[in-house]
Amino acid sequence: MTNRSAKPNEEQGSIKSYVIGFILSLLFTLIPYYLVTNQTVAGNQLLITIVIFAMVQMVIQVTFFLHLGRGPKPRWNLFFFLATAGLVALVVSGSIIIINNLHYNMSPSDKVAKIANDENIYQIGGQETGACRELLVNHKVTISNGLVNPSYTSANKCDTLTLINEDSDTREISFGEHDHHGVYAGVTEVEIKPGRSETITLSETGAFEFHDHLQHETAGQFTVVE
Amino acid sequence: MVGAHELNHHEAESDERLAFGFWVYLMTDLLMFAVLFAVYAVLHGNTVGGESGRELFSLPLALTETIILLTSSFTVGIGMIAARQGKKSQVLLWFGITFVLGLAFLGLELREFYTLIQDGHTMQSNAFLSSFFVLLGSHAIHIIVGLMWVATILFYIKKRGLNSHMVRKLTLLSLFWHFLDIVWIFIFTLVYLGAFV
């Protein structure tokens, strides 16, 4: 008992340790605050600097306030803390890397155009997407026995084109020439199951041809004018 | 005498186990905050044309909150020293100061939330504000729990005196409070200072 009460400060901290911790913490709060308000350094360099200050301040508080690593051995608290710190680093850095990567890869313009077309979003942030505000006339094209009827459709912009598959094979309608597929209004391919139909919005003007990717003699044409 | 010594020994050991158990809880709580920080880091740019943190946050206010919480963490430490020496009036004083500082911190934080919401910057506005309110709200809830905890312990110390049972509770409370201060350092750095980088 005498041993314990004689040196309680060893593991539980003294006023001195709290004062030192407090002053250091204040310093490590005020310095990054000063750096940010004065913008002495900028950009990523500044971000890294203030994060380092936060890390050091964490170590200061863990040492001087929580007295981690000063208890009796084995220091399970410390081990557990370090293991958690590792997990935290993994979760945070992993999430940031993965999501930034997704963010970068998920917004190519043709995908945006397709979504805009599918959802009839005619403008995003004040910019026209090329999608239609309202849909006009619907044209029907029937595919039966491998033949496209009518094989040529003339339409106005913002009409719709419905492709009806009456055959027993699934059609994979592509645009452009066979093996040199193009994209029509953000759509790369239309899959039509047997007996079903699919509708596309004619928001892009010009002359186009389409064909079944699996059976390229099944082909048709359409023109879209303003 | 030997019996008493052994009893003390057992008590010290069970105290240690209790503190370690609480430490494990704190570390899982830390993991939760880590996920919220990751969410904030990922979403803080998604303002959907709305105002970003740079326009919405006030650095002097954030600094004031930080210094208040830091000071409260310091007074908890001083209060713990008094508690281990069995000085009841000092414990009431230092933990009382902690309670007042914690309340001041919470008041400033809630006022900031209120101002934001009044100006139409709510959780529903965009992903940035959703993650902001969830991260800071979680911290604020912890502070509220901590304040209720301080109040309860102070009430019982006043009523029943400062016994070893109370010192044990104060030890866990001090761990909790220091932990909240450390989490706040990262909120201050990444959310507030980070918005102005």
Image (cartoon, grey):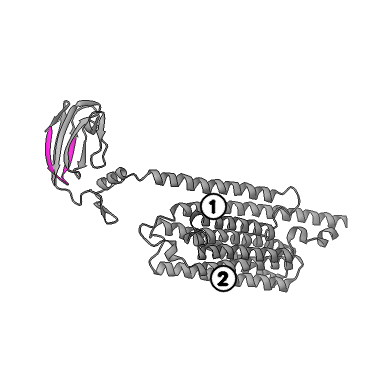
- Residue at image location 77% in from the left, 61% down from the top: A9
Q: Is residue A159 magenta?
A: yes
Using the image, determine if residue A121 lies above or below residue B83. Answer: above
Q: Is residue A175 magenta?
A: no
Residue A164, located in which quarter of the rendered image?
Answer: top left
**Left-right relation of B183 to B10:** left
- Residue at image location 42% in from the left, 57% down from the top: B128
* Residue A19 screen position, x and y as percent: 69, 66
- Residue at image location 60% in from the left, 72% down from the top: B100
Q: Which residues are magenta?
A: A151-163
* Residue A214 screen position, x and y as percent: 25, 26
Which part of the image, by quadrant, shows the N terminus of chain A? Answer: bottom right
Residue A5, located in which quarter of the rendered image?
Answer: bottom right
The residue that disc 2 covers is B103
Residue B102, located in which quarter of the rendered image?
Answer: bottom right
* Residue B176 screen position, x and y as percent: 62, 60
Q: Is residue B55 visible?
A: yes
Amino acid carrying label 1: it is: Ala
Helix, strand or loop for disc 1 = helix
Q: Nearer the viewer, residue A185 or A199?
A: A185
* Residue B184 screen position, x and y as percent: 56, 61
Disc 2: which chain? B
**Left-right relation of B140 to B97:** left
Helix, strand or loop for disc 2 = helix
Q: Residues within 10 Å of mark 1 (few under 14, many from 20)?
A: many
Disc 1: which chain? B
Badge number at residue B34: 1
Q: Nearer the viewer, residue A144 or A10?
A: A10
Picture mark count? 2
First reached walking from the N terminus: tag 1 or tag 2 = 1
Amino acid carrying label 2: it is: Leu
